Amino acid sequence: MNASPWSIYELLEDAAADNARIHEVLIGLTWTLCETDRGFGLAMSPTRGTRTLPWPGTLAGRSVGALSPWIRSWNPHEACVGMAAINAVINPTSQLAARAMPIHVQGSANLAVFEHFAPRLAGRRVVVVGRYPGLDSLQLDWHLTVLECQPGPEDLPAQAAEFVLAEADWVFLTATSLINKTFPRLVACAREATLVLMGPTLPWLGELADWGVDYLAGVRVVDSTSLRKTVGEGGGTRIFETGVDYAVASLGQNGNHIPER
């Protein structure tokens, strides 16, 4: 899609244009959880904390419409809260999420998406944006490249994106890219690949097909009480065992849902 990089954020704000009230915002070590009149939304918390946020104690009672513009912020904490608030009105009532295919976990739930697509990845050039915990433990017959902002010995740095994404057959992109504003650039680089947008930060929006997304792999809240406890107690991948499950939906032209085969 040839458009301003801000157009994806316009979509998110428009989809979350709602008078729903925020009941609580909980910023955990790994996940930020927002509860509204509509339900719950998640977003990945910034990797670096701070003690100087200006708004703690003021968010509950505000409208989602007041916080959703924060998704445009270059402050990572504001953008994270904005994303969680957006997801808290989009995801609980999304028919796309309701119709998505549950992923049956065989190993680590954190890696379930890769295992789900494994039969289609054999012999393919696969790029994963973000080093997922335990990724090296997967014994898949793929040619794997990992792009990482803080690269380890087996990773490539973020500036390699234009080079490796253009040659990829499949790309798995974390939805956290919406928060850190790398989404427009990365989807443009991956336009020739089959693109999976994934993670608990994912908004269940079929219109993401217009940006070249072929599959959505996101979470659905199955136990909000356990999820809240896990997030508040610093849980990371633990949320997949307590509060959420993974599901996948494929997107057709204009975001129409195509059932998995």
Image (tube, rainbow, N blue to C red):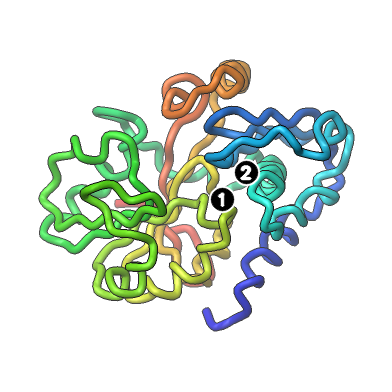
Labels 1 and 2 touching (C-beta < 8 A):
yes
Q: Residue at x 31, y 69 (%)?
A: 165
Is residue 38 shown left or right of residue 160? right
The answer to which quarter of the image holds residue 161 is bottom left
Sort mark 1 into few (<14), some (14-19) or many (20+) by Cα contacts within 10 Å: many
Vertical placement of 164 versus 59: above or below? below
Horizontal side, residue 136 vs residue 230: left or right: left
Residue 87 drawn at (x, y percent): 65, 45
Q: At x 57% / y 61%, what residue is drawn?
A: 181
Look at the numbered disc 1 and give the secondary structure of its residue. loop
Give the residue type that dot 2 points to: Asn
Q: Amino acid at mark 1?
A: Trp
Residue corresponding to mark 1 = 204
Residue at the image point whose x is 49% and y is 67% from the top:
209
Is 46 displayed left or right of 58 in the figure?
Answer: left
Q: Residues within 10 Å of mark 2 (few under 14, many from 20)?
A: many
Task: State the mark number for residue 91.
Answer: 2
